Image (spheres, rainbow, N blue to C red):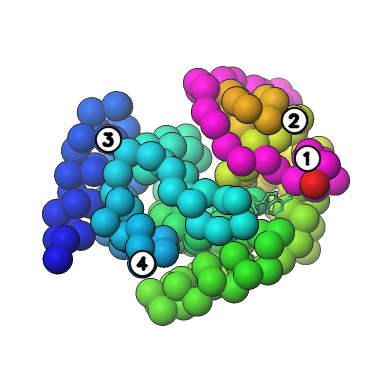
Amino acid sequence: MINFKKARDRMVETQLISRGIRNPRVLEAMRKVPRHLFVDEALRDQAYSDYPLPIGDKQTISQPYIVALMTETLDLQGHEKVLEIGTGSGYQAAILAELADRVFTIERYPNLAYRANQVLQKLGYKNIVTRVADGTLGWPDEAPFDGILVTAGAPRIPQPLVDQLAPEGRLVIPLGDRLSQELALVERTEKGIHQTYLGGVRFVDLVGKWGWEG
Ligand code: SAH
C-alpha cells in the first residue's frame, strides 16, 4: 500500500521546488490535494510521477509541475473568481479551489465533467461549479474573472476569454500548433493587453469555436 501523503511531499520536493516553484500557498495546495483520486484506480501508483496520465476520451491529467507552474502564474491571493477551460479529471480545479474564492470550470466531454464533479463533491469542494460547454466562449454570465486558466492547447487566444478578464486579470494559455505550444500569460493592465511567454509545453487540443476543429 502506497503512502500517498509521502508521495505528494516527495513530488513537491523533487518536481516542484527543484524546478523553481516558490509560492508557499501553491506548494501547500499541491501537498494537500489527493491527486491519486483523480485518476483511474489502475493508475493510482503513478499519480505522483513526473508525467501526464490518461483520463479517458484521449485526454490527460497534466504533469504535476505544469499544474503548479500555471497555478503559480495566476498569482492568486484568495479572493479571486477563476475560470478554468478543460476540467478533465478535475484535479486542476481542486488546486484552484484551494487558492481562490470561487472556481468555474468548463469541459466539453459530459462523462469527464460528470466524473470530475463526483470526485470534487466527494472531497467536499463547495466553491467549484462545473459546466459542459465550449469553453472557448468563456462563461459570460459569470464574467469578469480575475484569473482564467486554459488547460488545452490553442491555435490563438480566444477573444471571449480576453473580454471576460477583469482589470488586472491574468489569463494563462498554451499557444501553438497541435504538437507543441508555448505557455502564454496575458494580462489586462491599465495600458492594455500585455503578453509574455513562460516556456514550452505539450497539451491536448482545445477544440471549439476559437480552438481547433474537432
Ligand atoms: N485540467 C485537467 C486536464 C485537462 S486535459 C485536469 O486537471 O485533469 C484538457 C481538457 O480540455 C480535456 O478534458 C478536453 O476534453 C477539454 N477541452 C478541450 N477543448 C475544450 C473546450 N473548447 N471547452 C471545454 N473543454 C475543452
Are circles 2 and 1 on residues that touch, CB within 8 Å?
yes
Q: Position of residue 209 (x, y in %)?
A: 85, 46
Q: Give the residues drawn in magenta, as a range.
A: 190-213
Q: Position of residue 124 (x, y in %)?
A: 40, 77
Categorize mark 3 by other alpha carbons within 10 Å: few (<14), some (14-19), many (20+). Answer: many
Task: Write down the residue under mark 3.
Answer: 15
- Label 4 secondary element: helix
Mark 1 or mark 4: whose residue is earlier in sequence = 4
Could you tell me how far apart the alpha carbons at marks 4 and 3 are, in whole angstroms? 23 Å
Mark 2 or mark 1: whose residue is earlier in sequence = 2
Is residue 199 among the parts visible in the rendering? Answer: yes
- Label 2 secondary element: loop
Is residue 173 among the parts visible in the rendering? Answer: no
Label 1 near ligand 1 (CB < 8 Å)? yes
Residue depicted at 48% across the width and 38% down the height = 70
Could you tell me how far apart the alpha carbons at marks 2 and 1 are, in whole angstroms? 6 Å
On residue 211, which mark appears?
Answer: 1
